[in-house]
Image (cartoon, rainbow, N blue to C red):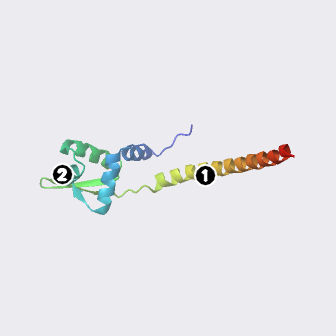
Amino acid sequence: MAQYGQTHFDASFGALSDATRRGVLEQLGRSDASITALAQKFHMTLTGMKKHVSVLEQAGLVSTEKVGRVRTCRLGLRGLEEEAAWLERYRQLWAARFDELDIVVEELKRKEKANGRKKRK
């Protein structure tokens, strides 16, 4: 299996594998928010939300800034363009395979229909 030098893929996909973290990214896409506000929105403890934000921050998907006692979260500078391109290659591969399968299925249906006509005569 090919080894990918982009270790950030592991961090990105690991961060995105959790529904809460995906929800946090969606929320931060609408507006910046404090960890307290995020914890309340997702009905979890501050400690739990801090852990989720930390995973997102390590992946570069979120950045935080502490002013006084409030830590504000915003979307990070790094996007998911490389990950999207990687996924797109596999989407195209699977689409091509399904297109080939459709051709085989249509050919089998055509033969079955032709054989059905021959048997009735």
Kind of residue at badge 2: Thr
Question: Is residue 80 visible in this depiction of the protein?
Answer: yes
Q: Are marks 2 and 1 in contact (CB under 8 Å)?
A: no
Label 1 SS: helix
Percent x, y for residue 91?
56, 51
Q: How far separated are the C-alphas under marks 2 and 1?
A: 43 Å
Which quadrant is the N terminus positioned in? top right
Give the side of residue 83 with respect to residue 108, left or right: left
Determine which residue is flagged by label 1: 95
Which circle marks residue 36 in the picture? 2
Q: Residue sitting at 19 percent across and 43 percent down?
A: 45
Give the side of residue 71 with respect to residue 11, left or right: left
Q: Residue sitting at 25 percent across and 60 percent down?
A: 32
Percent x, y for residue 80?
43, 55
Label 2 SS: helix
Percent x, y for residue 30?
30, 62
Q: Mark 2, mark 1: which one is toward the viewer? A: 1
Q: Residues within 10 Å of mark 2 (few under 14, many from 20)?
A: some
